[in-house]
Amino acid sequence: MKDNNTITFLIKAGDAKGLVSEITSFFYQRNFNILSCKQHSDTLAGKYFMRIVIDKNDLKISRKQLEDEFSQFAEKFTLEWKVNYSDQLKRVAILVSNTSHCLYHLMSKLNEGELNCEVPLIISNHPKLEYVAEQFKIPYYCLPVTKDTKPEQEQQIIDLIEKHHIDLIIMARYMQILSNNFVTRYNGKIINIHHAFLPAFEGANPYQRAYERGVKMIGATAHYATPELDKGPIIDQDVERVSHEHDPDSLKRIGKDIESIVLTRAVKAHLDDKIIVNENRTVIF
Amino acid sequence: MKDNNTITFLIKAGDAKGLVSEITSFFYQRNFNILSCKQHSDTLAGKYFMRIVIDKNDLKISRKQLEDEFSQFAEKFTLEWKVNYSDQLKRVAILVSNTSHCLYHLMSKLNEGELNCEVPLIISNHPKLEYVAEQFKIPYYCLPVTKDTKPEQEQQIIDLIEKHHIDLIIMARYMQILSNNFVTRYNGKIINIHHAFLPAFEGANPYQRAYERGVKMIGATAHYATPELDKGPIIDQDVERVSHEHDPDSLKRIGKDIESIVLTRAVKAHLDDKIIVNENRTVIF
Amino acid sequence: MKDNNTITFLIKAGDAKGLVSEITSFFYQRNFNILSCKQHSDTLAGKYFMRIVIDKNDLKISRKQLEDEFSQFAEKFTLEWKVNYSDQLKRVAILVSNTSHCLYHLMSKLNEGELNCEVPLIISNHPKLEYVAEQFKIPYYCLPVTKDTKPEQEQQIIDLIEKHHIDLIIMARYMQILSNNFVTRYNGKIINIHHAFLPAFEGANPYQRAYERGVKMIGATAHYATPELDKGPIIDQDVERVSHEHDPDSLKRIGKDIESIVLTRAVKAHLDDKIIVNENRTVIF
Amino acid sequence: MKDNNTITFLIKAGDAKGLVSEITSFFYQRNFNILSCKQHSDTLAGKYFMRIVIDKNDLKISRKQLEDEFSQFAEKFTLEWKVNYSDQLKRVAILVSNTSHCLYHLMSKLNEGELNCEVPLIISNHPKLEYVAEQFKIPYYCLPVTKDTKPEQEQQIIDLIEKHHIDLIIMARYMQILSNNFVTRYNGKIINIHHAFLPAFEGANPYQRAYERGVKMIGATAHYATPELDKGPIIDQDVERVSHEHDPDSLKRIGKDIESIVLTRAVKAHLDDKIIVNENRTVIF
């Protein structure tokens, strides 16, 4: 199922008359078959978003040349844009602590060919999940952390990420708060799963607090990490019905599947170049 | 479908060994057929809840006598309890402002015999929905309110509620905040629908704020009103998936069905004597 | 919220390279602002679908002229197409029998300005729901039917539909099977709500059969009526969780809200020109 | 989280007056703390179901003696019953073919201590998933099968099941139809996951058929296997919304999570002794 024959452009613009026509003509004139073209007009903010997928087999010039030509075109319309080639697998680092459910879910999907990426490493502040990494033959870096060693440990993570040319960092229930510095450095490249239906229960112990508030549904939220904790652009959310019969431990157990699925869906949307961030919200094509 | 042949006891206790057996024996010895018996042990709080439904046709003594005997029994085990007879229709007042969807939903269910209650009056601070009341031939009291006249207006509401022997007050999108005094007076007897998935977006303009936060699901929450705004025991909640395509107006429109359904479900659970409040949470049998 | 400023084209084609570009250019060259443009490529069937919405305020020529020009253009690319002007309200006939929930839901949405249509008449084979029609001041035609009078009664319905220039017929729990003749005559113009999650439980008594099969969720399906009963293109579906505690009557009660919401959503999608039928499936933009 | 301190009785009876009281008294008189007691009256069929959980620490006599005494008691009221001790882990065999998602989901839950069972073996007709078994260090028996060798292969499965004293057989996307003989032998002990929302799309290729029918939601169903294919008592079901954008491959991919979760939930309900089969339906306490 891995797609390696497409080129995807993600484009942001002011909401300009004629833009669909201009952009599609750009590709049409170069003899590209447009496989998919989706747009969104944020009329309240006066912004325009487009995702356009073309057939790599139609590429008769170099990638550089295509990009140069599009760059010139984009300047004329003051478009922000980026391009992704599906044959260039994104490189993903997974950060975990000591619960395995999100990691297993990601690994089994990767295994079955459903995630268009490579995972060169798993990083953790705990030794506990090393066996999972071993099961899937992925290098596991255990970088324990205390209050005092936090800056050094984060630097070690950065070094690993840089060394391995990582494109996306997945916080698969990594239970440390990353520094502003770290988060800003990898802006738009860190996906976190929060174990609550944001903006409810931001921060620590959401299941306990959900129990205390007596909610009748619990949820999970995948979002891009930003310096403000649990405030970043939401990619996906889901919920499950619960009742008075569920104590905090049951909520935690029920929540695991929601977390796994929501995180993996968000990661897949990112890997498939379906997300454009619009201020603090996301457009998911 | 209206049930008028049952007697329902709702019981709270400390989690005592043997209580199921003792309580069911109480009824068994008096030759009552137990139609339904549900329990919940809140092991964290050390509390026990029971709902027991018996067949009214088995009642060979007076209601007063049954209650006296159960009262004596309850004292022995320090039970809190109340009893409801399904042939005594609860009397409901509906408070509305200017959106009709919750009112229509309640009225059409009432009309089809699905809500075990009478609605002797609808109260509003606006004249707008009088036509709905007229459609269903229910007296409509329009009590406009300003900051200055709030206490007087609330007293008018109280007078109406007392005069009509109201058992349950439904805030079907009544857009005024009731005073602590009012809410405390009718503790456990006011069901409000909040147009958000609590505890997210407590207070005003939840759809606008949901839009700004970029959530991927919106919801509604029915709860008993308590002095702290939107903090009362939750009875029911539900959500619907939304996307970047929905502006605040669309969210509002989508939210209407969730609000209507959640409110009516909560009201039905209350009318069917299925709810016991446990501190700030609810047990829904 | 009623939109009366847009023109919507629904287009079907063979999956032709360059079509997005050509079509959007058609409108761009005529100085139309494209408000929305959605496409779908059915790559398995080799078909292409587009919905394009333009701003009526940009219309500087007559509607006829626009249609003539588009017609010429469409011929070149062998497009099937139709155009709708949002200021031309669609005229809707509602058919009911003796349950009111779907009718109330439609009426309350219409009342709140959420359905872009007029309802000049309600037709029923029963007198029972006349009071609902009266509540909303809509003419009610009661056309009782027996096996013997079926052809005549259907002719009476056809006469009413023709006389009132009806664009859409909603079967809001109309419990008669319409003849092939009728259904074929109004192909793509009859929306039916089936009280089950199709293709499960086609035909009569779905809730009873759902109960007997012991399903854990029940649902409803809105679809265009076609000669084969309950086999037409599905527009929308939804489900609700149920349990062993629900007997057929409870299932029926729970199902009502699903039916109402699914039917109204399907009707709204149709009225907003968001549906293109693709053989026996639907594209919902 | 593994519970090894409880004793659970599952009881079936004719709907007899006084039964709750009699049964709870039985345990009360023997000084058992009743941790949970749930009942269901199937009033249409005149049947009564109870699940009662007592504290093993209160057991002052032998298990045999408890069972003998209850047996005598049960005879008086013509109860059908069975008892399970949570410290006696059920032994589970998992049957797979060549998709790993259900297996991974079960294994990761087992790993995290959420399934109260042992898995002494995995059986497959394919070699493909041996690596998963190895990852989790569980013996893998590859028993290929052709039309001609079907009876022998099934006998080999039976031999393994008998040898390993298996209590529950999970068909985790095992793509062979088991013989009537096999299914009857292990009546109530085989849980299958069907990749459709039964009774829709019984039999082969449900996703392809769902695509062709144009459904707007797909689902999965866990049920006890019975001789009639896909007709056994349903334990759990769930669905996910899909659209015209999903081709059969996408449906398959989306369906995987539904299958995994529904199967695991059903297995957990069985392992926690929460299921009583009522003819062709299930009571899930």
Image: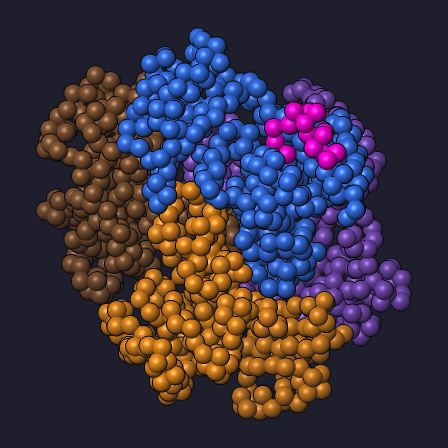
Chain colours: A orange, B blue, C purple, D brown
Residue at the spot x=82%, y=59% of the render? C5
Residue at the spot x=42%, y=55% of the render? A207
Please tell me whether residue D26 belongs to the stretch shown in magenta.
no
Residue A233 relative to residue D249: left or right:
right
Can you say whether A216 is above or below B51 in the image? below
Residue B66 relative to residue B181: left or right:
left
Residue at the spot x=35%, y=81% of the render? A148
Of residues B33 and C203, the one nearer the viewer is B33
Visible in this render: residue A162? yes
Of residues C116 and C14, the one nearer the viewer is C116
Identify the main secondary structure in magenta. helix
Q: Kindly indicate the quadrant of the structure image that contains residue C92.
A: top right
Please tell me whether residue B167 belongs to the stretch shown in magenta.
yes
Can you say whether D208 is above or below C79 in the image? above
User: In the rendered structure, which segment of residues is drawn in magenta?
Assistant: B155-169
Visible in this render: residue C185? no
Question: Where's residue A199, x and y in %?
Answer: 54, 61
